[in-house]
Image: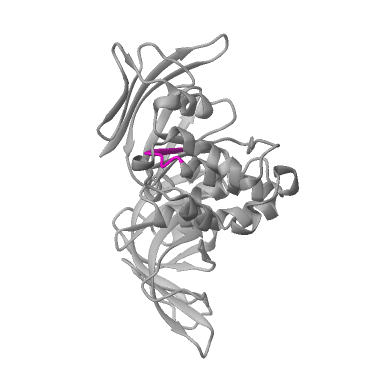
Amino acid sequence: MSIRARFQLCKEEFSLDVDLRIPARGITALFGPSGCGKTTLLRAIAGLEHCPEGFLQIGNMRWQEEKRFVPPHRRPLGYVFQEASLFPHLNVRRNLEYGLRRVPAAQRKIPLDRAIELLGISPLLQRKPHKLSGGERQRVAIARALAVSPRLLLMDEPLAALDQARKQEILPYLESLHRELDIPVIYVSHSPDEVARLADHLVLMERGRISAAGAITKMLTRLDLPLAQGGDAEALIEATVAAHDKAYQLTYLDFPGGRFTVAHKDLAIGTKVRLRIIARDVSITLEHQHNTSILNIFPATVDEIVPAGSAQVTVRLLAGNAPILSRITRKSAALLDLAPGKAVYVQAKSVALLA
């Protein structure tokens, strides 16, 4: 099952020209600088921007093709904007119930109480919007979008208007939606942190065009893309909680290339987690080091090397089948005689658990 979208739209100083196929599951992030067309594409998918020659298919549902255009109010989707846009004269519960009017009872797949539980807003139901914090308002807006039992959830930078504390408050709720609901999400953002934490699939946009698309673990480590060329180049590793070490307050996480050690996290054995490894925190050796404080050391194979400025290179390595990036000096690469196919060891000095 996939989502297929093809749109062309011309405005005075901007044109959108996309032909996209993405999975109809998980979270797909539309990522790129301001003005690149992320929101315009999202609005075209919602039917709010009408592209006469467009095509849109969500799984087995065709919402737009030649001589057919399903209007926005008849598309079973939820839309979360940057601002919550709640009705100020209604309390939270009545705001949530308002959206239910467009969904026949027989088609309601997400009970309202379930949406309330997932977003943790039960204590807020009797409050008016002006009595809510920014994070609380956005959680209510997301619950309202879920209450219509959407087949697709569109989110247009839902955290952009929040300060850092409110963002950290709401991110766990977005992760719970990802885990517990089988609804595809298209998520617009220009925040690398949000994308790294939430997205399964990544679509890069520039000047109204799609420059690249694919699984986020592969996209972040593609050396031909700008994401791997900046100072914050990183890799994401999918891992599983394998064990806890009570004596040293550590948690062990297994991935295809071995086992990571991180500070203790209160997670059940078998929990799937995501790890972030910054390229500048990864060093390379030719032999397994034993007299070192670094715990996360894995055998790997050099896959690709590209320049990163005049003095450094970025090395793409494969530990098992997991790609990891390392940013080292050109001199270090020369002294180690690094080349594609060479067997080495990677040392990760710092690992962040995104869970």
| Residue 174, image x, y percentages | 51, 52
Q: Is residue 105 visible?
A: yes
| Residue 169, image x, y percentages | 63, 57
Tell me which residue sits at (47%, 29%) in the image.
42
Tell me which residue sits at (34%, 42%) in the image.
106
Tell me which residue sits at (54%, 84%) in the image.
249
Could you say which is closer to the camera, residue 32 or residue 347? 32
| Residue 132, image x, y percentages | 71, 49
Whether residue 336 is situated above or below residue 97 in the rendered picture: below
62 falls in the magenta region: no
Could you say which is closer to the camera, residue 91 or residue 34? 91
Which residue extends farthest top? 12
Whether residue 71 is situated above or below residue 124 in the rendered picture: above
154 falls in the magenta region: yes
Q: Which residues fall within the magenta stretch?
A: 148-155
Give left or right: position of 355 versus 134: left
Q: Is residue 309 visible?
A: no
**Looking at the rendering, which quadrant does residue 253 occupy?**
bottom left
